[in-house]
Image (spheres, rainbow, N blue to C red):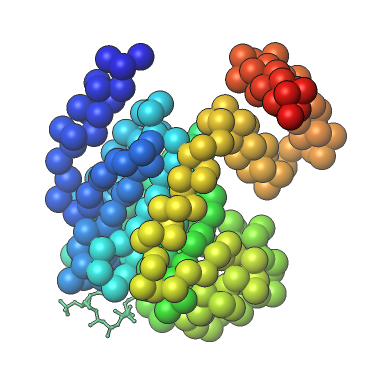
Amino acid sequence: MILTYYINQLKIMNKKYNSIRLTTEKGIANLIFNRPDQLNAMNRQMMDEIIDCIAVVSQNEDIKVAIIKGEGRAFMAGADIKEYGNQTREEFKSFQERGKKLYDSIWNSSKPWIAAVNGYALGGGFEIALACDLIIASETSVMGLPEVFLSLIPGGGGTQRLIQKIGINRVKEMLFTGNKYSAKTLMDWGIVNTIVEFDSFDAAVMKYAEKLARRPSNSLAQLKRLANLSLTEMSFNLRIEDEGQTVFKLFYEEEAQLAIRDFITKNKTE
Ligand code: COA
């Protein structure tokens, strides 16, 4: 057990990235976009590093919760438009395909991923936040899908994932206008979970993550899986059946049996 922990730690410490950083503390991973002078705009190298990092974090059983944030005044201002200008057709195709893998790997990871949006989260940056399970935003953060200004559309699930989350009319407004939205508006629309003051942002995000990290990983994984299933085409009856089978399976795992016994013992002695 201890040996596995140190092997996992070594795997993380040996990771060398250029455009992102990965730190871990108390079972919580921090994936930090690190191109602050370019507002963390995502180029190909950065995208590849993010995909690698998500896999490292997702496979590490000592990590309970993952946070994504940006260095400097942005979470991420979207895809690197300057690099777009030099991409061949093949490179752009590959960028889009790799992008899908990035968003899907957060969505399908068994761990909870928190987007800690500290500033601009635009285009692909906002789509990464949408692929996360929870969004904690600083009060001064700004989010949106401005692709329409480039005669483009979002390519990372922005049109579909967002419609499922906030409804078609609000999404059409966001997509058609390309407007930037405050954390407050997006909280009212149900996308942002919590707004935190800018000065205490990192500490508040960490406190939130620590709370989740204390919850049993097997329950969290199943809760995430089942919640995400609700956005698929699977029928309601099948999803309810899945829920029933999952609770049955969890009930007979050691963690649940111990927790139930603990509860009963504590109540008897009090
Ligand atoms: N791609 C490439 N570079 C970007 C970028 C992006 N998506 N977003 C910002 N940058 C770069 C700027 O070119 C600038 O670089 P420079 O100093 O080398 O010129 C640097 O980041 C700072 O950005 P700047 O525009 O000067 O900051 P600002 O505070 O005036 O404006 C934004 C901030 C986010 C409103 C503005 O940068 C912007 O609109 N970015 C594009 C957002 C976008 O369309 N995203 C979707 C892409 S598909």
Q: In percent of the image, x 64 and y 66: which residue is there?
A: 190
User: Which image quadrant is residue 253 in?
Assistant: top right
Q: Is residue 133 left or right of residue 267?
A: left
- Please state the horizontal and vertical placement of residue 116, each as a whole percent of the image: 42, 60
Which image quadrant shows ligand 1?
Answer: bottom left
Q: Nearer the viewer, residue 189 or 104?
A: 189
Q: Is residue 197 visible?
A: yes
Q: Is residue 266 left or right of residue 193?
A: right
Q: Nearer the viewer, residue 190 or 7?
A: 7
- Please state the horizontal and vertical placement of residue 53, each as a whole percent of the image: 30, 40
Q: In percent of the image, x 48 and y 39: which residue is there?
A: 213
Q: Nearer the viewer, residue 58 or 176?
A: 58
Q: Is residue 98 left or right of residue 195?
A: left
- Please state the horizontal and vertical placement of residue 91, each as a whole percent of the image: 25, 52
Q: Please state the total of marks drawn on the protein image.
A: 0
- Please state the horizontal and vertical placement of residue 154, each as a whole percent of the image: 46, 65
Q: In percent of the image, x 58 and y 73: which residue is there?
A: 186
Q: Is residue 44 visible?
A: no
For the N terminus, give its image quadrant. Answer: top left
